[in-house]
Image (cartoon, rainbow, N blue to C red):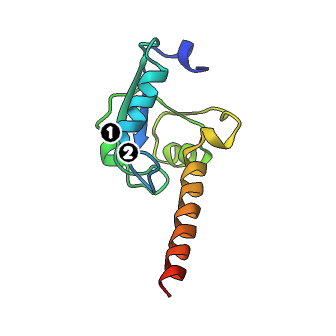
Amino acid sequence: MRLYPDYDKIIIGVSNYGPKILEYEEIKKIFNDVFKYLPKYKVISVKGSVTERTIFSSLFDINFSIIVTGNQNTFRVLKEIGVPVRLIERTDGVWNRGTHLREIARRENDKNKRKYKSLQT
């Protein structure tokens, strides 16, 4: 919401990189529900990861003037390759960061795999 007055249009890029907690269509629906009365927002799927440097072909298919991120690594990589980027302070709380949510999901998945293995032996 802090960005809303600063830009005419805001595109939220949802990366398909890494372990998924929700599918893209579910994430898009959540964002669209949250922002339904704020017409500046648009949600798109982005293939790859900025920090893994696998996103660049799909990134340049998007018409944008600047990328805004709260991720220090994303900011650093984009700045290194000359993409216009703005770093903003992230919202507090683990539930506002996809990286943390994916890590929790990965740990739970690993724990469930260990339980399953022990049941088989």
| Marks 1 and 2, the one that precedes in the sequence | 2
| Residue sitting farthest toward the bottom | 121
Q: Quote the CA–CA distance across marks 1 and 2.
A: 23 Å
Residue 6 coordinates in the image, percent (x, y)? 55, 15
Q: Residue at x 57, y 61 (%)?
A: 108
At numbered mark 1, what does the secondary structure look like: helix, strand or loop? loop
Determine which quarter of the picture holds residue 15: top left
Q: Residue at x 38, y 51 (%)?
A: 48
Determine which quarter of the picture holds residue 93: top right
Give the residue number, with chain letter if any, for mark 2. 23
Q: Residue at x 54, y 81 (%)?
A: 118
Q: Amino acid at mark 2?
A: Glu
Can you say whether 65 is above or below 78 in the image?
above
Can you say whether 49 is above or below 112 in the image?
above
Residue 58 coordinates in the image, percent (x, y)? 31, 43
**Camera-side residue: 67 or 112?**
112
Determine which quarter of the picture holds residue 1: top right
Can you say whether 101 is above or below 3 in the image?
below
Give the residue number, with chain letter if any, for mark 1. 60
**Camera-side residue: 111 or 61?**
111
Nearer the observer, disc 1 or disc 2? 2
